[in-house]
Amino acid sequence: MPEASTAAANAPRSLAEALRARDDVALTALLHARPDLLNPVPGDVTQLATRAGTRASVVRALDRLDRFALQTAEALAVAPDPCPYPVLEELLTGSGGEDAAAREALPRALGTLRDQALVWGDDDRLRLVRTARELLAPSAQRPSPTGLGPTVAEATAGMSPTRVQEIVAAAGLPPTHDPVSAVAALTGLFTDPERMSALLDAAPAEAHQVLGRLVWGPPYGEVTPDPAPPVRWLRDRGLLLPASARTVVLPREVALHLRGGLAHRRTEPLAPAVGVHREHRPQLVDANAAGQALAALATVEELVKSWEHAGPLVLRAGGLAVRDLKRTAAALDVPESEAAFWVELAYAAGLLASDGEADERYAPTPAFDDWRDLPPARRWSVLAAAWLPATRTPGLVGEQDPKGRTLSALGPDLDRSAAPEVRRRVLDLVGELPEGGVPDPEAVLERLAWERPARGTSGLRARLARWALHEAEVLGVTGRGALSAFGRALLEHGDAAGLLAPLLPEPVDHVLLQADLTAVAPGPLLRPLAEVLAVLAEVESKGGATVYRFTPGSVRRALDSGQTASDLHAFLAEHSRTPVPQPLAYLIDDVARRHGHLRVGAASSYVRCDDDAMLGEILADRRSAALGLRRLAPTVLAAQADPTALLEGLRAMGYAPAAESGTGDVLVARADAHRTPARSAPVPVPDGPPVPDATLLGAAVRAIRAGDLAATAVRKEPAAASSPGVPGELPRTSAAETLATVQAAALTGSAVWIGYVNADGAASQRVIAPVRVEGGFVTGYDHTADEVRTYALHRITGVAELAEDQV
């Protein structure tokens, strides 16, 4: 007994005392786990404890608990306060302690709660932080996750003493002299297993059915003014207590007896395993992932290049219009959801941005040109490094925000701060499997749900996880569902170029021309060859080997860009490993022969041709009526349409006109690529305060310890009664006393305790060792700040000497 009394006397009486008893390592772990406590750095341990108990901080800490740690906190919220460890263990393992897994996992879960400063006290007096208890304890407005209701004492609060005595009598208990003892007697009955079992044995069978519907929650049920006999039997004996005029509630003690002492129907002490669902050879995974990576590079480059001449307009509210997203998806030959991903990826990598002009459009940034000059593996690393920490969530595109507005690609409100954490955790779970191992996506989701249960929130984390798995596959971080070797390097080192480069094919400098007017590129082409071929032919199919098709329109496009027929013949002969097919040569010569035979210029516009018979043919064609043509001369037709519309109209009629300048020269129809001014990539939105580094944590712990020393230091009693020296209060001394004390401390090299008010009016307590006092200032080593500082004497409210055993 003396040992127990000593232990109880030494037990912490508050969270502040419990934190003060921690060593620096434990205090550092708390600040690392809950970085919101550092903004700003608490002045002492008391401020730290106060901040750790605020609602916002506690909610954030609860949201980051795993399922069993949260179940432990929920059990403490319905347990007596304080709660002995055996009582808590019974709530989680049952009266008989049958759940061995929960019993073994409880010390870890309780340790997590203690480390997070959500629970304090020794095992004999466990206390849940008051704010956490308020959040997790059951109430009529907010049911407990345990499904338990209020205690007998809480449910009978406000009930008339006569009614309480009636319940006591109906339950077979002797009458008491006051309501408090009556409630205590009723509580004692409901918590006594033997007497409770005897009482329930006497209940009607229908009453057991009523209790069965309420036992696991919700504990509230509606009743009529004249309830059925089984309900009346339960209500008369307090097994159901009135919560309102038409509602009854099952008391917590009754529910726990019926549950066998369990706070939860099902405890989950162990994290669900993520095993190998399928398995592939690692070489096959890497090859597949490398192919996806190469396709990702081609897709992003094609997307950005398609916006360099006339990119889509920026919506007034920001973002990409739905029709522009549809057009982009059609151009890339992907679904709209995937098009949104590529657009957002290019934006996150800083390759796309708005140009900031009056007629604001999206366009490539100068960084796009630098990116294209990088080797393929480095280009992929840039994309992957932008994707991994990105908080913008393209999976939300097309959905509606809380105000009913549709979320658009590149628009606002797409940031979800949890996305990077979920994305990395999903990849870590995949990476924990053996090489080539593919997990079951549902097992991954179950594991994430256990590690971070959604307390009353939507299933956003599950959706983020599904999107992460899909995005990792199309980007090439995974192949066939397994993490690739360069994907592992990306997670571990942030750079995968070294492992990816050998897996990518070298760019080729040739194509294979075929007799059906197609060309096959047996691999990625060198950029100069790819750029010319993209003008001369249309892409017919993509993949490991890209197929291009030559058409009259594509050949005319090449001629419009300033090429001649002889240039095109020479280009194909130089870059084809097969002879140039005769049909392709004929196609080029035929289009070139007709190209520029008609000349279009600005009058409003005109058509000029040396062949007056062809002009007559155009005038006679009914399709030319919309152009408003009339003959001005044997070789000239005037038109009401502008030159661009005239060119398009004549081409639609099957002609191949060329535009000419005011001097009669052929205009080369090659637009200059548009670039935005220099733009930086969007910065991810952090999920709360950033995780502090070791330097900041060390400095914060030193500052808290020093501030605590200043606030709790034992001071000598002053000779005068004007300053009682109460810990935690600013000292009050006269200016003369203050000056004399700090001068004496400077001479003797001792430390003193001062109260100080800065220029902003903020008061603080500090322990300083004065070294110089002159000119109205005192300079000394500040133990609180761990540095030498200077203080104005007129701002010192008072000073006190420290006790002999203090600093």
Image (cartoon, rainbow, N blue to C red):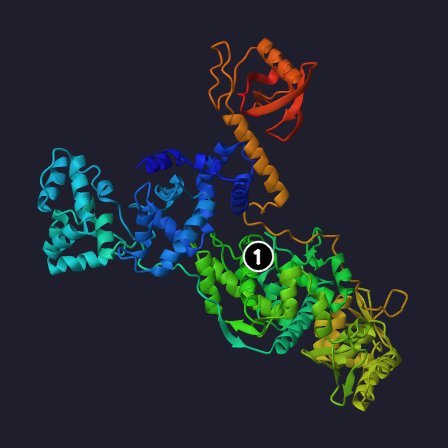
In this orientation, which residue lies closer to the viewer: 539 or 262? 262
Rendering coords of residue 321 (x, y %): 60, 60
Residue under the image location 47 percent in, 42 percent down: 57
Q: Amino acid at mark 1?
A: Pro
* Residue located beneath label 1 in the image: 420
Does 380 sit left or right of 688 as displayed? Answer: right
Whether residue 693 appears in this view of the structure is: yes
Q: Which image quadrant is residue 230 in?
A: bottom left
SS under mark 1 = helix
Q: How many marks?
A: 1
State the residue at coordinates (67%, 62%).
383
Q: Position of residue 552 (x, y in %)?
A: 76, 81
Q: Position of residue 572 (x, y in %)?
A: 83, 82
- Who is closer to the viewer here, 745 or 437? 745
User: In the rendered image, which quarter is residue 539 located in?
Assistant: bottom right
Residue 337, can we see it?
no
- Picture coordinates of residue 755 (x, y %)? 55, 20
Q: Quadrant of residue 323?
A: bottom right
Q: Is residue 199 above or below residue 346?
A: above
Is residue 100 placed above or below 335 in the rendered structure? above
If the image is split into quadrants, where does the N terminus sit? top left
Q: Is residue 550 above or below residue 5?
A: below
